[in-house]
Image (spheres, grey):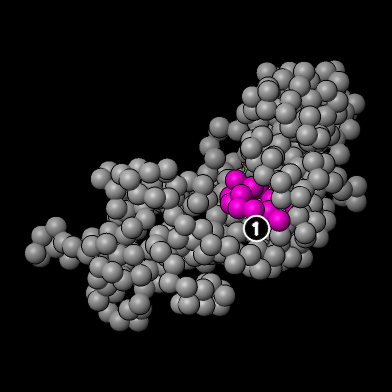
Amino acid sequence: MTPKVARYLADMQPVTPCLVLDVDRVEDNFRRLQAALPLARIYYAVKANPAAPILERLVGLGSFFDAASFQEVSMCLDAGSAPGAISYGNTIKKERDIAAAYAAGVRMFAFDSEAELEKLARAAPGASVYCRILVGNDGAEWPLSRKFGCEVEMARALMIRAGELGLDAFGLSFHVGSQQTQTAAYEAAIAKVAMLFTDLEEAGVKVRMVNLGGGYPVRYKAEVPEIDDFGAAIMGAMVKHFGNSLPEIVIEPGRFLVADAGVVQAEVVLVSRKGAEDPVRWVYLDIGRFGGLAETEGEAIKYAFRTPHDGASEGPVTIAGPTCDSTDTLYEKSNYRLPMALRDGDKVEMLATGAYVTTYASQKFNGFTPLAEHYI
Ligand SMILES: *Cc1c(COP(=O)(O)O)cnc(C)c1O
């Protein structure tokens, strides 16, 4: 938690649940990433947190943007981004949304299928398009499975087809899964994309851009490699496979830029046990899966907690949200431990919750108001 966030929580005593996010930290993260990968152009994955103060700060820093929908394209434009700095990176788009983005000046689009390519040719004539290939997601704590991307053979055919349709087949992309903890995942994906790159060159398609996607991890409960380790591994692999004729390099960080800038503060609603001798206490908070903590599904992302009793003796807990739905249980199998002194009314902080929380909150499930957001 940054000192600014700590001071805000102490001075303002905001109503819980809430997210307090230090926008200066987003800037620090942007600069750290730039230093780790100086040859890469940064497209912020807006879906991680589309709050206007974040987008405005990033516009000021010269960031580019990866938008998942026309609504996100609009948010970037409203924040002052030039349309030419926006990539419409979702491979699944309505044709009328492609047309709307094109009319707004967006010229960079992702695809991974022939039907999408045909939509692009109709609704965004002449646009620069890039094909997403399927790569392994091993090592990712929030993997993306097979939903996006196509096999290399298909990507090759589609890139050739893109040119025939009057589009500029300028790039290839992949995404190694979010919260990717292994640098080797990028190295393997770069090797795969480089082979296709060469193959396409031989087929007469001059690819000029490689988009390495997102996935750069942040520290939750467990340590992760430093961003410089990812930078070194990625540049090592790029040079190994592309030599000194490097293509334009694009990266799409989401989590890395915003997660550790934010802290969710919650209130303990109840601490109870299921039997007098049961060693495990149930700790119910005023935020849960439906309050925005969607990435606790399968206990995939393990947030770290702060409590007013840290340092005192601890015991095992199951941590759950406040709604009347049993899937609103955050951590039951991950061996969480919290202080024995914890009781209702205590405020607890969940660290590094600036990414993938606010927009995942349900509207009013069980009547609970979505968490408040404070950008400082
Ligand atoms: C979600 C997403 C990202 C951002 O991923 P992070 O793991 O948050 O860095 C980048 N690119 C694409 C295409 C995405 O879908």
Residue at image position (52%, 64%) is: 20
In the picture, which quadrant includes the C terminus?
bottom right
Residue extent of the magenta highlight:
42-56
Q: Residue furthest left?
A: 276
Which x, y percent locates residue 21?
56, 64
Magenta segment: does it hold 54?
A: yes
Which x, y percent locates residue 234?
73, 54
Determine whether, in the image, residue 7 is placed left or right of residue 198.
Answer: left
Residue at image position (71%, 46%) is: 78
The residue carrying mark 1 is 53
Residue at image position (74%, 40%) is: 87
Which x, y percent locates residue 159?
79, 26
At label 1, which amino acid type do we have? Pro
Quarter of the image holding residue 196? Answer: top right
Q: Up-down: is 202 above or below 284? A: above
Determine whether, in the image, residue 2 is placed left or right of residue 341.
Answer: right
Rate crowding at label 1 as few (under 14), some (14 to 19) or many (20 or more) other CA atoms within 10 Å: some
Magenta segment: does it hold 340?
A: no
Label 1 secondary element? helix
Which x, y percent locates residue 64?
76, 49
Q: Up-down: is 96 above or below 273? A: above
